[in-house]
Image (spheres, rainbow, N blue to C red):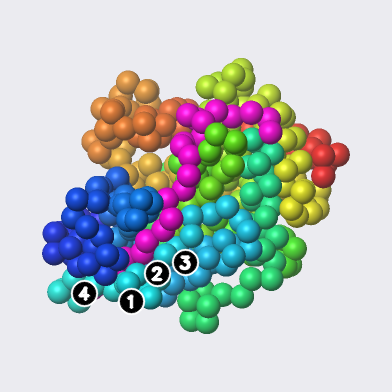
Amino acid sequence: MDQLIKDRYNETILQEAMRRYGIAMDQIHILDSFESFIYEFERGGESYILRIGHSFRRSESLIQGEVHWINYLADGGVSVARALSSKNGKLVEIIDDGQGGQFLVTAFMRAEGQQPWDAGWTPARFENYGQLLGQMHALAVDYHALPGCERPAWDDDSMKFVETYLPASETIAHQKYQSVLKHIYRLPKSKKSYGLIHQDAHQNNFFMDGNGKITLFDFDDCVYSWFINDIAIVLFYISMDAEELGYPNAALFTQDFMIRFLQGYRRAKQLDPQWLKEIPTFLKLREIELYAIAFRDFDIKDIEHWSFESFVQTQGLDPNSGNHIWMANFMRDRKFRIEQDLPFIDFDFMSLSEHL
């Protein structure tokens, strides 16, 4: 979280947010403060989530667009954590920070279940995952944003992580990134292939209950992009857990996972098989973006001589944080793989056509 936001946040802001949502002092506790202040609270025997962000990071109109999209999906039957109104009937409450900015407060239903690696994956649950994405994309086809509150496109300035954070010295990585962009900009757009997507539907952003039902949350990064990008991002993150899921490598995991995922997806939405060949491009896009984000979040030095042991000593990295250790593993040989243009997953994605 930006230090400016931390410096402006205080107990008075929290108390005002609690008042507006009718939250008792002994019914709330903090969960996270990575990008926003996230709390869980109880009311009427139910659990909810309170999020306090700042206009320095996201404008009111962007958050209005986010919650409008979430509730549109919920109304359409998609399993997402619905946004809730305050006591004043507002989906977004604005609290002045006294220094020219505003804290923006939203509340959501708490998703039922637990994190998916605790609930346990099965082939049927991979299908549920695909069906959820398919339902979301199907509804996106005819979605009309709240006027004046449209979410950004995938290449908006706020999404330019590589241009902003990747050091100029990473010359080859910048060149590879430009090559990826050149290809993506040539892709056709239509209502069937392009619309509002989650853009971050990985395992940290949904819960799964005992029956395998998945409830998606954290739409903070939702943008307009190709639907196949959303699918590629799902695969990008879950494939990193291939060994933990019992597979010797990401390619063998991809074969089993994508067959099931696409079977679920097609129950909700058709996908032209020709889009499968674009998955490697979008995997590469996310790979280079995440490489850049590593430079943003950690004081990375001597990347040419990377080792896991040295990386966990990097300033800003918490060796007790599962997310930070995940990032350390991601960075293993990453510079070499990007510069040598090695595929993120060495797999023939067109071989999946028969499952669509």
Judge whether 160 appears above or below 149 on screen: above
Whole-percent x, y for residue 170 in the image: 43, 44
Outermost right residue = 354
Residue for point 28% across, 28% down: 320
SS state under label 1: loop
Chain-order first, disc 3 or disc 1: 3
Chain-order first, disc 4 or disc 2: 2
Crowd band around label 4 with a 10 angstrom C-alpha radius: few (<14), some (14–19), many (20+)? few
* Res 77 → quadrant: bottom right
Q: Is residue 1 left or right of residue 84?
A: left
Amino acid type, residue under disc 4 in the picture = Asp
Amino acid type, residue under disc 1 in the picture = Asn
Judge whether 264 appears above or below 86 on screen: above
Residue for point 42% across, 50% down: 110
Query: 71 and 253: which one is in front?
Result: 71
| Picture quarter with the C terminus | top right
The answer to whether the residue labelled 3 contacts the one labelled 1, judged by CB atoms less than 8 Å apart, is no
Q: Which residue lies under the disc numbered 2?
A: 85
Chain-order first, disc 4 or disc 1: 1
